[in-house]
Image (spheres, rainbow, N blue to C red):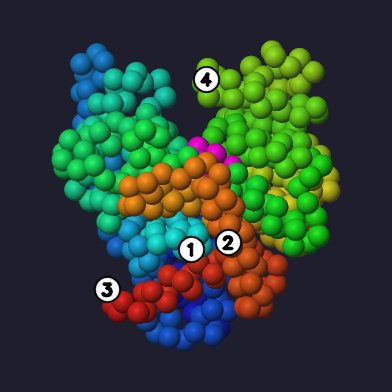
């Protein structure tokens, strides 16, 4: 039996970090049959080493707002594990960012990146700076100051950050420009770049498309298909928008989306053109949807979205948004599959209920790996100084997501957790990283 004191020691060493505790606890319990079978991993303390970042960089970010007043934020980069490749993971700019949040995201990223089959280690970073409400010039000054420190710790063969919440094409552009100025190098040091200066096609669509490719494989394994299914997708940002797009291409109907204020239910199916206009062009709130579609209904508050009857539920917004109460509502309404487009959006109790009631469940580190997969493909294109067509990248993405599902399913069966894709994904990702760590010695 796995030594539970190992987990306790890790949690005690990292107090007041509930998100990090949640993900480490989940992964540890998934890996118990691995520890029983591979004593060499236990003796080498692979899990303890995996749960400790190789490097954490914290720095101040001073910048000047449009009123010529000096502002100061915190900046972070958690370089978690480089056993299988350079650190890879997003930068998050949001007022909720703190070290424990980034450690949770970085730890998840190690296993997620391993599952893609691409040579990428795990990392995460960001700042408590919130770009919302800031002018372009304020965002630029912040990004330049942020990169004045971060550039020392990154590089195409060292650490390749990407975007995340609060970091889109604008922010990536400002940071890339500053990196280029500081280093006098045009390299693939960031992903999510513009198409005219090293970016990859499909990057915008990647997480939403990849999520649906994973769901398709999940259903196929049970003799079902996405076609004609009714779908709920929480959130209305990049992931949810392109989930809606891919669902429609596959013949499914998304009837509800949300934002932090509330949700919209449209029994005729969410109109993709309207959704894109509101969120991508106008940067508005989802409640504006009903102005163009009066038969749709807007409801204040987000949690009620899970009370809508559906075949497939996709939590695509934020961590722990789908709790046991929401899971019970979905189960009572006959949901057949749930897959996570966000990072850890389902609570442990919710996941337990889904497994108990035989609901197909795709964990985020597997189901939402499409974004980092295409980031990895962008890195490859940058290294080769070439660019692939939309169809080429999309085809590669689909194969990667199919392989991720198959690897998780096979691992779950090999370690006596048949059909449990949470355990399967954790095991498959861990084994790849653990083998590399064993081969490279005590570093």
Q: Quadrant of residue 53?
A: bottom left
Mark sitting earlier along the chain (4/3): 4
Q: Which residue is mark 1?
A: 117
How would you rate the neighbour count of disc 2 (Cα within 10 Å): few for under 14, some for 14-19, many for 20 or more? many
Cα gap from disc 1 to disc 4, whole angstroms: 35 Å
Q: Quadrant of residue 399?
A: bottom right
Q: Nearer the viewer, mark 4 or mark 3?
A: 4
Cα gap from disc 2 to disc 1, whole angstroms: 8 Å
Residue 198 lies, with reference to residue 109, above or below; the image says above
State which quarter of the image contains the N terminus.
Answer: bottom right
Residues at badges 1 and 3 in contact (C-beta under 8 Å)? no
Residues at badges 4 and 3 in contact (C-beta under 8 Å)? no
Any part of residue 38 in sight: yes
Q: Which residue is mark 2?
A: 404
Residue 405: where, in percent of width, then height? 62, 61
Cα gap from disc 2 to disc 3, whole angstroms: 28 Å
Residues at badges 2 and 1 in contact (C-beta under 8 Å)? yes
């Amino acid at each position: 039996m796995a030594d539970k004191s190992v987990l306790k020691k890790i949690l005690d060493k990292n107090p007041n970090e509930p998100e990090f505790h949640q993900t480490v606890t989940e992964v540890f319990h998934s890996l118990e049959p691995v520890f029983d079978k591979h004593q060499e991993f236990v003796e080498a303390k692979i899990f303890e080493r995996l749960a400790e970042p190789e490097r954490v960089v914290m720095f101040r970010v001073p910048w000047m707002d449009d009123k010529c007043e000096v502002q100061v934020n915190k900046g972070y980069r958690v370089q978690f594990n480089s056993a299988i490749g350079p650190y890879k993971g997003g930068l998050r700019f949001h007022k909720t960012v703190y070290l424990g949040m980034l450690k949770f995201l970085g730890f998840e990223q190690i296993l997620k990146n391993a599952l893609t089959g691409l040579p990428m280690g795990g990392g995460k970073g960001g700042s408590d700076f919130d770009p919302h409400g800031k002018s372009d010039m304020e965002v630029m000054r912040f990004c330049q100051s942020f990169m004045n420190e971060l550039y020392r710790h990154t590089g195409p063969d060292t650490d390749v950050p990407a975007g995340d919440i609060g970091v889109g094409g604008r922010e990536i552009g400002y940071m890339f420009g500053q990196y280029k100025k500081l280093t006098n190098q045009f390299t693939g040091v960031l992903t999510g770049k513009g198409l005219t200066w090293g970016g990859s096609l499909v990057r915008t669509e990647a997480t939403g498309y990849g999520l649906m490719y994973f769901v398709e494989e999940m259903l196929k394994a049970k003799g079902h298909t996405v076609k004609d299914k009714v779908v709920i997708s929480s959130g209305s940002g990049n992931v949810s928008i392109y989930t809606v797009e891919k669902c429609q291409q596959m013949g499914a109907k998304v009837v509800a989306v949300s934002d932090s204020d509330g949700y919209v239910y449209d029994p005729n199916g969410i109109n993709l053109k309207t959704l894109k206009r509101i969120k991508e062009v106008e940067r508005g709130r989802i409640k504006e949807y009903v102005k163009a579609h009066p038969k749709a209904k807007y409801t204040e508050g987000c949690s009620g979205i899970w009370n809508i009857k559906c075949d497939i539920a996709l939590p695509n917004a934020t961590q722990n948004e789908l709790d046991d109460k929401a899971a019970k509502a979905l189960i009572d309404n006959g949901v057949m599959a749930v897959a996570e487009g966000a990072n850890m959006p389902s609570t442990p109790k919710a996941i337990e209920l889904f497994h108990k009631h035989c609901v197909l469940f795709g964990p985020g580190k597997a189901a939402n790996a499409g974004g980092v997969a295409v980031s990895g493909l962008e890195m490859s294109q940058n290294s080769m100084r070439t660019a692939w067509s939309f169809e080429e990248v999309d085809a590669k993405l689909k194969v990667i997501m199919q392989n991720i599902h198959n690897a998780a399913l096979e691992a779950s069966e090999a370690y006596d957790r048949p059909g449990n894709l949470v355990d399967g994904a954790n095991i498959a990702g861990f084994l790849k990283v653990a083998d590399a760590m064993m081969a490279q010695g005590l570093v």
